[in-house]
Amino acid sequence: MSFYIAIIDYGIGNLKSVSKIITYLGEKSVITSDPEILFNANGIILPGVGAFGDGIKNLKEKGLIPIINGIIDDNKPFFGICLGMQLLFTKSYEMGVNKGLNLIKGEIRAFNKQKVEKIPQIGWNSVTFQERNHFLIKGVPNNSYFYFVHSYYCMPEYEEDILGVTQYGQKIFCSMICKDNIVGTQFHPEKSSKYGKKMYENFISFCKK
Amino acid sequence: MVLTKRIIPCLDVTEGRVVKGVKFVEIRDAGDAVELGKLYDDQGADELVFLDITASSDKRKILIDLVERTGEQIFIPFTVGGGIRTVKDIKKILRSGADKISINTAAVKNPIIITEGANIFGSQCIVTAIDAKRVYVKNPKDSPDKKVIELKDEKFCWWEVYINGGRTSTGIDAIKWGEKAQKLGSGEILLTSMDRDGTYDGYDLELTKIFSENLDIPIIASGGAGKPQHIVDVFKKGKADAALAASIFHYNEYSIKDVKMICKKNDIPMRI
């Protein structure tokens, strides 16, 4: 089958905006929870908005957790966005404690109201890259702005998993992650105009290698 | 590096084309909605808002086709409002590709729609739009159930909520309604001054400021932008999180980039 990106359908969030940007960039995408279609894809995107607990519950109910683990074992390019990135972590403290996929060691924590402006953070904020040679940020100037909507942030255990950081109020948090063929963004690149488009382009190019 | 203030062009639409009502009555045509949206994205708009201005009064359905086309071509967040009455309407618009919906009349008549919408789709996509108009009073004691503010020149006023596209007064205090909308689960407030809308005289800074100070959720100020300084003022003096404007951009008086450069010179954090 020809090149396509699979967007994991787990009954949560607006998956359509992700598929639309891939179409706009001239490539094919499939929104699916079918294991075969996922395993045959050239790259995988796990989007999502909403609560961590609901996200994990839905992945479990659809039998997607072993499939995601298999995809990662295959070293297939994998892009987690917003909640989709947070779900890759060990655990989250959003509304109780929930275990995540544990593909990235670390935790998801709530912003502290004393240290930030308003919760959730809604709007455009800049990302400072911790590494300049990563494929996802090729052609994207350092400190470019991206669109964020979130109340929780990730804390990777290992510094090498941090690709970008962002300051909100007095808090500096990890806004981009990378580990082997896994990448993730707290912001929504599909809503971040030209540099968001550039990241999708970079991800697609990487999937073609 | 901080969270930036947002500049949001508003496209009042009817049948897929942009119009701008001056004080909600006189209407002029300003072009195709998706084309204009793309132009604004290129110029650096932080979001877009589509308001179907005929929908609420004429019971017309939202232009789903426009929402679909926008989502296919424009990659910044966009909000759709006008004539949304039920959770089913909300679902339809979000499924068509909008990032947020704004509700005005329906939320006043049936506030629980905010909570229902937020529970299903998340607070981040529920924007409560409030059309507010000043009611001047001689003495605050005359309106004990209203949040009366002292203005300059020893004048007093409170703000009344209007619905049905600004045609129907409700007697409801706008600030109290805003606080309630926040409690019910609204993610943002789109606050329009009916006194200023279409006047080019600048935003109602007192109104914007009192909302920003009383609410924790972001306030999008609307109504009255006629020149870049008005936008600077609504951020600095009105403490708004975002400024919405229409005419100033539609007729090429100023580009979004012009306005953003002026804001930046005034030390307002901007995505340029």
Image (cartoon, rainbow, N blue to C red):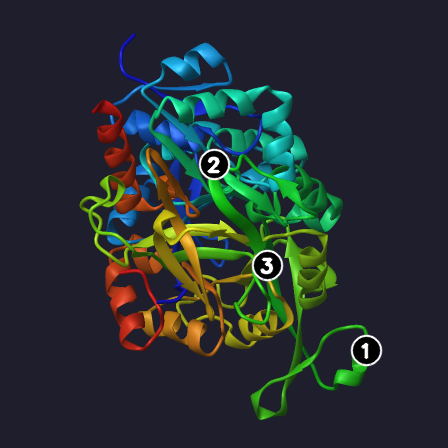
User: Which numbered dot is residue B144?
Assistant: 1
Give the CA distance from mark 3 to mark 2: 48 Å
User: Which numbered dot is residue B131?
Assistant: 3
Give the CA distance from mark 1 to mark 3: 22 Å
Query: Which of the pair A56/B124 is nearer the observer?
Result: A56
Q: Which chain is mark 1 on?
A: B
Q: Quadrant of residue A79?
A: top left
| Pointer 1 or 3: first along the chain | 3
Picture mark count: 3
Which residue is at a point 59% across and 59% down the rendered structure image? Answer: B131
Q: Which chain is mark 3 on?
A: B
Q: Quadrant of residue A194?
A: top left
Which residue is at a point 47% across and 65% down the rendered structure image? Answer: B241
Q: Name which residue type carries label 2.
A: Leu
Query: Which of the pair B95/A83 is nearer the observer?
Result: A83
Query: At which x and y percent is residue B79?
Result: 48, 44
Binning the other alpha carbons within 10 Å of mark 1 as few (below 14), some (14 to 19) or many (20 upward) gives few
Query: At which x and y percent is residue B19?
Result: 39, 46
Which residue is at a point 37% across and 57% down the rendered structure image? Answer: A165
Badge 3 element: strand
Q: Name which residue type carries label 3.
A: Asp
Q: A119 left or right of A203?
A: right
Badge 2 element: loop
Q: A38 left or right of A112?
A: left
User: Which numbered dot is residue A40?
Assistant: none
Badge 1 element: loop
Give the CA distance from mark 2 to mark 1: 58 Å
Residue that mark 2 sits on: A103
